[in-house]
Image: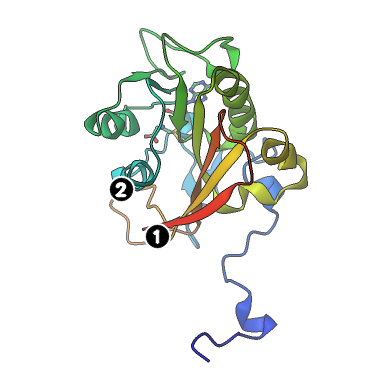
């Protein structure tokens, strides 16, 4: 048998989430970050200012072709937007934390500029609101939405509507855990996946695996 099936005990992943519904929710006090790494506690960064390693975005766009122009609405220092531009996409970026031009994505009512699709790594403590808002803005115009989220984001009962009522297209699991805090030796604790919706999709969602 090429793939032995482990018993229940050993099959339990050592990083199983304690409560998936709490992971990304507003319930977590945004002061200490208990979930970035296994043992250590880091001060949680204001507004969840964790910037996505380039390889995560590169892996996404190697697999999915987006209808552009793209909007990165939680762009931080523009790291993800830069990868998207390098791949040839026109990208408009915005963020709440921009000195001259702050934009609260949750207060927006239309797509920014002439953008059609949204790609981002949303702030974790308001991830569900971010996803829902992005879907309401982009899908009716035939756009797409890609969100980098905790792998178990779709496990919470209260979030099922995001996958059942909207045109969910693909879940692309990252098989390497992103390192959110640079220059540390600790093993990144959590698994992530790209969740992609497509306003022109009709049918069941598919699964894929990225490096
Ligand atoms: C996890 S970081 C992601 C940064 C960038 N997407 C990347 O991956 O490199 C989250 C970003 O969301 C921004 N943010 C938090 N709340 C926001 C809001 N309501 N509207 C827009 N941006 C927000 C923060 O300032 C922060 O830059």
Question: Which quadrant would the C terminus be assigned to in this image?
Answer: bottom left
- Image position of 59 with respect to 116: above or below: below
- Which dot marks residue 55? 2
Secondary structure at badge 2 equals helix
Of residues 166 and 177, the one nearer the viewer is: 166
Residue 206 is left or right of residue 40, and the answer is right
Label 2 with label 1: CB-CB less than 8 Å: yes
Q: In this orientation, does residue 41 appear?
A: no
**Farthest residue in the front direction?**
202
Residue depicted at x 30% and y 26%: 89
Q: Which residue is rendered at x = 29% and y = 43% of the image? A: 54
Query: How many neighbours does mark 1 have within 10 angstroms: few (below 14), some (14-19), or many (20 or more)?
Result: some
Sequence-wise, the earlier of marks 2 and 1 is 2
User: In the drawing, does residue 168 fall left or right of residue 38?
Assistant: right
Question: Which residue is labeled 1 in the image?
Answer: 176
Quarter assignment of residue 14: bottom right
- Under tag 1, what secondary structure? loop
């Amino acid at each position: 048998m090429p793939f032995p099936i482990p018993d229940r005990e050993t099959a339990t992943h050592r990083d199983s989430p304690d409560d998936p519904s709490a992971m990304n929710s507003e319930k977590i006090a945004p002061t200490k970050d208990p979930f970035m790494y296994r043992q250590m506690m880091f001060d949680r960064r204001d507004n969840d200012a964790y910037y996505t390693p380039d390889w995560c975005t590169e892996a996404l766009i190697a697999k999915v072709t987006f209808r552009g122009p793209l909007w990165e609405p939680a762009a931080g220092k523009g790291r993800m937007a830069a990868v998207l531009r390098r791949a040839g996409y026109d990208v408009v970026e915005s963020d709440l934390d921009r000195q001259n031009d702050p934009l609260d994505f949750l207060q927006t009512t239309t797509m920014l500029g002439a953008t059609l699709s949204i790609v981002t790594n949303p702030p974790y403590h308001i991830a569900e609101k971010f996803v829902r808002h992005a879907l309401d803005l982009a899908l009716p115009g035939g756009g797409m939405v890609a969100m980098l989220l905790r792998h178990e984001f779709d496990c919470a009962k209260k979030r099922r509507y995001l996958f059942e009522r909207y045109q969910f297209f693909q879940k692309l699991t990252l098989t390497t855990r992103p390192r959110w805090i640079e220059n540390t030796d600790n093993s990144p604790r959590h698994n992530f996946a790209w969740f992609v919706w497509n306003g022109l999709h009709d049918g069941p969602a598919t699964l894929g695996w990225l490096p």
